[in-house]
Image (cartoon, grey):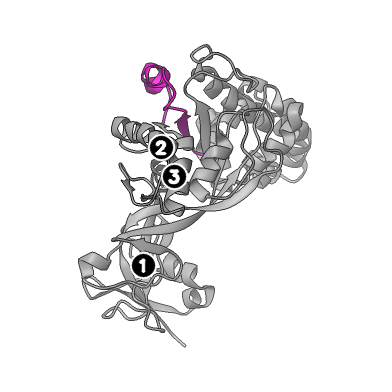
Amino acid sequence: MLLGICGKTNVGKTSFFSACTLVDAEISNRVFTTIKPNFGVTYVRSKCPCKERGVTCKPQNSKCVDGVRYIPVKVVDIAGLVPDAYKGRGLGNMFLTDIMTADALVHIVDISGGTDINGNPCPVGTHNPLDDIEFFRREIDYWVLGIIKKNIDHISKRMIVNKEKLSEGLYKQLSGLGVSTEHVERCIEKSGLDVNSPEEKFLEFSRTLMEDSKPVITAGNKIDIPQAEEIFNAVKDKIKDIIPCSADSELALRKAAEKGIISYMPGGGDFEIRGNATEKQLAALESIRNVLKNFGSTGVQKIIDTAVFSLLEMIVVYPVENEHKLTDKKGNVLPDAMLVKRGSTALDLAFKVHEDIGKRFISAVDARSGKSVAANHILKDGDIISIKAGR
């Protein structure tokens, strides 16, 4: 699973990336600071069963802090888009290709209205964030449309000569964008597309396909800037899945926690001063505390959690070998927390643990109930499952 952090240039994408990963990436107030994508690992939060079960867990693929399991997720910071990127402006084709590697997108928007459509600084409140939403969607839609138009004659010929379906031809051209045959078939039906449809209909198909295969959550960044909250309140009902955030505040808190100046957990609504801090640092921290009071958190962790659990519809499941002790074969308690798609079965989990275990699957045991479950048993969030496999 990969989350793509994207948007126009100079809106805080790399600050957001650094805040959620603590990877040192170049940050500045100028366009095209990021050229090549930066990759890192962040975490989603889920309630660990350790407290409920009265055990001390020993995570192997994640970490547990006071009963909260932090599960790793890959993220990529993608260079900024500029208008007409789909035509190749600003290395647009390369950037759009990078976007397509992600499973879901975190669209960073300067909610203070302090950067123009090209990413240049402008007076706060003079740029409408709604224009960024439409611009971002337009660039992706027209880029996909361009790929289709370039190949539509070839697709049409194969439909006549090889009796291929339109969905087969489109899938062959678009599979590199991380879409499935199901995505293509579903969106052909939704848009009422056929091979002789006008360009407008193909554009509708492109937009539907991207909405279906690349879900987007919008980060209303720079909410800490004066006037930003007013702008956010004015546009929030017009933007689907938008969450206010301050990437700079989150980055400052995580770095302060790393240095031992404060005690802070990502996504928390407050922090505690623990170490020596200068007057300047204390003033900055107090300013950030006001952000936490106003919005409940900096928003960064909430955005990551929402992208994984709501947009991508993932749940957390804990595979164990011994359903009584909740251990793996080495005795590690609740060793792994695995992200699986909502609706996954016990057999799906077995294959995720290891392909050989999936092939040798016999049954599974729900550790909470102690009952055996079949291969088609639908998993629930927080399940602890022991898989039984043949030799």
Q: Quadrant of residue 366?
A: bottom left
- Looking at this view, is 182 or 68 the one in front? 68
Q: From the viewer's perspective, tell me whether residue 29 is left or right of residue 305.
A: right
The three-letter amino acid code for the residue at tag 3 is: Ile
* Image coordinates for residue 304, horizontal then vertical, percent: 44, 44
The three-letter amino acid code for the residue at tag 1 is: Tyr
Q: Are marks 3 and 1 in contact (CB under 8 Å)?
A: no
Q: Say which residue label 2 marks.
A: 279
**In the image, which residues are magenta?**
214-242
From where the camera sits, is residue 43 visible? Answer: no
Callout 1 crowding tier (Cα within 10 Å): few <14, some 14–19, many ≥20: many
- Of mark 3 and mark 1, the one earlier in the sequence is 3
Q: Say which residue label 3 marks.
A: 304
Q: Quadrant of residue 297?
A: top left
Q: Say which residue label 1 marks.
A: 318
Looking at the image, which residue is at 27% across and 67% down?
50
Q: CA distance from mark 3 to mark 1?
A: 21 Å
- Tell me if residue 228 is in the magenta stretch: yes
